[in-house]
Image: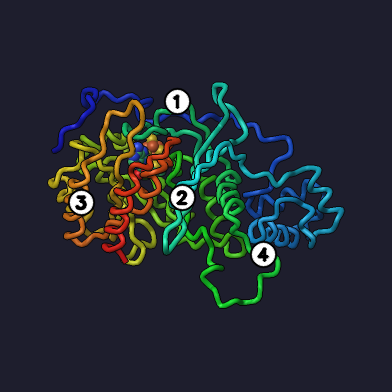
């Protein structure tokens, strides 16, 4: 077993508060709520609220769905297939507001990070989450958040240090995708230009969505489910479920439900190969230990060699990065269709850890690779310069390391 850098409390003395906080219940919706991000059912209700008879609602929902999620309409006036009266009635009661951008950072390689302000305040500070867009040659990945803060307290994670938490609404979850499409100009034009033979140019900039920003998505299950189902809707935003990945720290009882009710790809934050160390890094492990977690992964609905679980493993110097750890890791996940995502630790002020040395990450990844596991280092590429997990920081000095890692990862994967 590897040594740890942080002192742990004596084994067996575990207070529930160490493992998880309670999210705030109070969420004050704006006076005129936004329709952006709502499901078909919620939109039908909105039409009901302005007096649209029930028999017409289905058709109206169909129309507005197209405006919201195919065309990205920003005002009701643009929705020309709805009557003037209906547009006016909608505008009186609702808005098409997106999450508000508090800050935007664009990195040299085109990666963008938004700090988003949502309705509400926690201890005098506005509710804020982060959302990151990472362009790559073969894809464009949007990393979105599920909570303001996080209910859990992983010892290496900055988000976990936030004391108070509020769940995002389904609209705020979808709103991140809508807003990113706005900023990237990634909507379908009303009448697309005649084919110029350049199909590449018409490809979506956002081809993948990962729920790896702030928060534990399976502790905000219903909103995440409803939001991701809107994101995946084939008549709207149309992200295939195979291109949406949900990352969990290991909320075992919700993993099977995530498979059946959401059906997206699963990523699990493993980070350690023994319960003793994982208890310390991911305190939720005390509630749902490794054996149960791996069993849930093994049984994840729809798993196959073409649909693998991703195991995330943050590289912490002298903590979990020995080659014995690497060998134990491949033994532990034996038989589970999986890939392993090695994440260089992203330090934050006050954190007790250091990122593993580059040479060590390479040796570790070689053991994993030789055992037959692809170890793409995709999300951490964005994370590495952007720190989607609660840190506003531009680590340009890491760019070359990041690029080397990316090249290596590409060579190792499909
Ligand atoms: N709460 C979920 C999803 C959000 S965190 C989860 O824990 O899986 C997304 C990933 O970033 C997780 O694997 C998490 O462990 C990792 N992470 C958090 N803080 C990090 C840091 N400082 N450096 C590198 N990875 C980090
Ligand atoms: Fe929450 Fe994930 Fe950070 Fe852990 S790693 S505190 S679960 S956001």
> Taking 210 as reference, is 226 left or right?
right
Task: Answer with mark 3 or mark 2, whichever residue precedes in sequence.
Answer: 2
The residue pinned by badge 2 equals 111
Q: Which residue is mark 4?
A: 189
Q: CA distance from mark 3 to mark 1?
A: 36 Å
Q: Earlier in the sequence, mark 4 or mark 2?
A: 2
Q: Quadrant of the N terminus?
A: top left
Residue 260: in sight, yes or no? no
Q: CA distance from mark 3 to mark 2?
A: 24 Å
Cβ–Cβ under 8 Å for marks 4 and 1: no
Residue 183 in the figure: left or right of residue 410: right
Q: Which label was assigned to residue 362?
A: 3
Mark 1 Cα-neighbour bin, 10 Å: few <14, some 14–19, many ≥20: some
Question: Mark 3 near ligand 1 (CB under 8 Å)?
Answer: no
Q: What secondary structure is found at the residue carrying circle 2?
A: loop
Q: Is residue 404 left or right of residue 204?
A: left
Report the mark closest to the observer, 4 or 2: 2
Q: Is residue 206 above or below residue 356?
A: below
| Residue with the mark numbered 1 | 163
């Amino acid at each position: 077993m590897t040594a740890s850098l942080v002192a742990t409390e004596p084994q067996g003395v575990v207070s529930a508060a160490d493992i998880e906080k309670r999210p705030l219940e109070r969420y004050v919706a704006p006076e005129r709520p936004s329709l952006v991000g709502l499901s078909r059912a919620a939109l039908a209700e909105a039409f009901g609220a302005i007096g649209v008879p029930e028999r017409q609602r289905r058709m109206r929902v169909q129309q507005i769905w197209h405006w919201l999620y195919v065309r990205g309409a920003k005002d009701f006036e643009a929705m020309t297939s709805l009557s003037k009266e209906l547009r006016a009635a909608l505008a009186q009661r609702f808005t098409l507001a997106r999450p508000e951008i508090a800050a935007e950072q664009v990195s040299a390689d085109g990666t963008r990070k938004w700090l988003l302000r949502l309705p509400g305040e926690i201890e005098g500070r506005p509710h804020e989450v982060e959302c990151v867009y990472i362009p790559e040659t073969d894809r464009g990945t949007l990393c979105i958040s599920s909570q303001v803060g996080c209910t859990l307290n992983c010892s290496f994670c900055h988000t976990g240090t936030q004391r108070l938490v509020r769940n995002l609404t389904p609209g705020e979850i979808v709103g991140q995708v809508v807003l990113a499409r706005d900023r990237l100009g990634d909507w379908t034009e009303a009448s697309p230009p005649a084919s110029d033979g350049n199909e590449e140019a018409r490809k979506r900039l956002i081809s993948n969505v990962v729920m790896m920003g702030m928060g534990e998505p399976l502790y905000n299950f219903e909103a995440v489910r409803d939001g991701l189902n809107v994101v995946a809707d084939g008549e709207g935003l149309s992200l295939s479920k195979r291109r949406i990945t949900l990352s969990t720290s290991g909320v075992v009882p919700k993993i099977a439900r995530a498979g059946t009710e959401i059906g997206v790809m699963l990523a699990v934050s493993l980070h350690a190969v023994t319960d003793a160390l994982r208890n310390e890094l991911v305190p939720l492990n005390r509630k749902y230990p490794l054996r149960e977690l791996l069993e849930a992964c093994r049984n994840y609905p729809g798993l196959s060699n073409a649909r693998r679980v991703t195991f995330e493993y943050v590289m912490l110097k002298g903590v979990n990065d020995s080659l014995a750890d690497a060998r134990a890791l491949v033994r532990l996940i034996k038989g589970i269709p999986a890939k392993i995502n090695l994440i260089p630790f992203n330090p934050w002020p006050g954190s007790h850890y250091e990122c593993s040395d580059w040479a060590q990450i390479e040796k570790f990844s070689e053991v994993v690779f030789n055992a037959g596991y692809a170890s793409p280092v995709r999300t951490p590429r964005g994370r590495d310069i952007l720190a989607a997990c609660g840190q506003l920081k531009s680590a340009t000095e890491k760019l070359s390391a990041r690029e080397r890692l990316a090249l290596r990862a590409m060579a190792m994967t499909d």
